[in-house]
Image: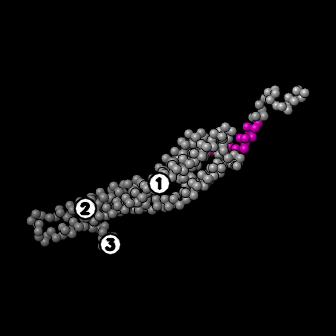
Amino acid sequence: MNIQELFQKGGPAMWPLLVLSILSLSTIIERLWFWASLLSKEKQIVNRILEAARSDWGAANEMARQANRQPIGRFLSAPLRLYNPEPDLFRLALEAAADEELASMRRGDKILEATIALAPLLGLLGTVLGLINSLSSIRLGDIGTAATTGVTLGISEALITTATGMVVAIFTLAFYRIFQAFLFNQAKIFRKAGNELELLYRQYWPAANAKGRLPGAEYSNSSFGADGLNRRSLNSQEERERNREPKLKGSDPAEDSPSNN
């Protein structure tokens, strides 16, 4: 029995099942490509950004910006774009970025869920319609005679839609659960990477805040925030502000030495 005969014997319910199977298969292929490209580069990106953050936050920001095509890169770049944020704001940016990225990873789940729910029901509907057609031609006087021989064949053909619907639903459900496992693992990776980055920032932020600049300024000229402020320009501005402050008498030993003589 080829596919054409299968569809003819299965009845009209086979066509909606065909549409659902095409949608499900295309979604599965797209999601497999997405997860394969993500999982192959994610660990390397996380290690590079965290290693750079231990010594140079500007370099870490640049690495995260370059990895902006990957969800983990956008996640770690969200707080690094801020200019000298407080630790609470840093954590809030991480949480908001994680929610957004994890939500985008659920793309296609609605199609798979709809296929899992509708395919068995369409299969049952096709079977019921086939049974109605087969049994509608039987009369009570024909039971047990040669006139009912075709009914058995009609019932077996009506069950084709049920089997097809179950196959489509089971196939889709298997990949749906795999993708859910990938998503759960991503939540763990995001949580671990975000906690490590936040811990590093909480270690450096008090000293950086006391100096009015971010950690790692002595190692890099790149800015840490989206406003493009340069760390060295900020330091030079502080130097000019200190020079403008009026000096109190007796504050400079070099100026007081003639008077003391």
Residue 89 vertical position relative to residue 5 in the rendered view, above or below: above
Indicate the quadrant where residue 139 lies.
bottom left
Magenta region, residue range: 225-240
Residue with the mark numbered 2: 127
Kind of element beneath mark 2: helix
Q: Residues within 10 Å of mark 3 (few under 14, many from 20)?
A: few
Q: Earlier in the sequence, mark 2 or mark 3?
A: 3
* Residue 218 drawn at (x, y percent): 71, 47
Q: How many marks?
A: 3
Residue with the mark numbered 3: 2
Image quarter hosting the N terminus:
bottom left
Kind of element beneath mark 3: loop
What amino acid is at disc 2?
Thr
Indicate the quadrant where residue 127 lies.
bottom left
Image quarter hosting the C terminus:
top right
Whether residue 82 is visible to the viewer of this picture, yes or no, is no
* Residue 247 drawn at (x, y percent): 79, 29
Q: Earlier in the sequence, mark 2 or mark 1?
A: 2
What amino acid is at disc 1?
Asn
